[in-house]
Amino acid sequence: MESFSTVMVVVALALIDAKGRVLVQQRPADKQHGGLWEFPGGKVEAGESCEQAIVREIDEELGLTVKASALFPISFANQVASPGGRSIVLLLYGAREWSGVAVALEPGSAVLWVDAQQMLALPMPPLDVPLARAIIPLLEGVAKAETAS
Ligand SMILES: Nc1nc2c([nH]c(=O)n2[C@H]2C[C@H](O)[C@@H](COP(=O)(O)OP(=O)(O)OP(=O)(O)O)O2)c(=O)[nH]1
């Protein structure tokens, strides 16, 4: 019997700048979770590794080049499937280095650099809420180091 996965893997990236801000992206109004703010990324396609999927999505959505070697894992969140449906596992990676300037390339989307408090005030999809909390210590650590230097 052929087996297939009932889990959809989605990868997302927290780009963290030298001031301890993170890049968030607003989903186009006509998509699922339209208008909500999330971390850029998308579904892992057949034949891709998670890292390859992030590198591709960041180029497609933001026009940025990020190296797979610059990615580090932060946390994950899991949405349990409804009966007969597919569950989502959302893997959040981080990166402190990339090249280019982020532009919202997907029609109807927008991007914003936010600090920890601004991030928490934005409406996000349910899966992103625990992930956003998980990056707060990282953002605050970078911001503190920047103020001290
Ligand atoms: N990219 C991303 N998707 C998220 C986040 N949080 C969350 O629940 N999702 C959900 C929304 C979607 O059901 C799924 C990813 O869909 P997507 O539309 O971004 O993926 P994609 O770029 O591969 O999309 P497409 O080609 O099918 O339009 O994961 C997040 O922080 N980033």
Image (cartoon, rainbow, N blue to C red):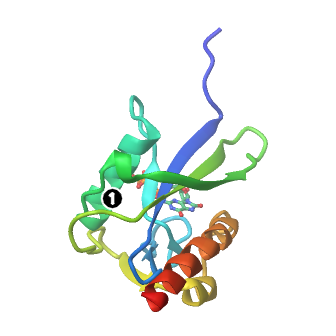
* Disc 1 residue type (three-letter): Ile
Query: Label 1 neighbourhood size at 10 Å, few (<14), some (14-19), many (20+)?
Result: many
For this rendering, which residue is in front, 41 or 20?
20
Q: Write down the residue under mark 1.
A: 58
For this rendering, which residue is in front, 137 or 5?
137
- Left or right position of 112 against 61: right
Q: Is mark 1 on a helix, strand or loop?
A: helix
At horizontal 66% and vertical 42% (from top left) the residue drawn is 86
- Left or right position of 25 against 139: left
Residue 122: image location, x then y, percent:
58, 85
Locate the C terminus by quadrant: bottom left
Residue 43: image location, x then y, percent:
47, 47
For this rendering, which residue is in front, 1 or 127?
127
- Left or right position of 34 against 110: right
- Whether 50 is drawn above or below 134: the answer is above
Q: Which residue lies furthest to the front in this view?
A: 149
Please identify the quarter of the rendering in which residue 118 is found: bottom right
Locate the N terminus by quadrant: top right
Residue 103: image location, x then y, percent:
26, 75
At horizontal 67% and vertical 72% (from top left) the residue drawn is 133
- Whether 116 is drawn above or below 109: the answer is below
Please identify the quarter of the rendering in which residue 8 is found: top right
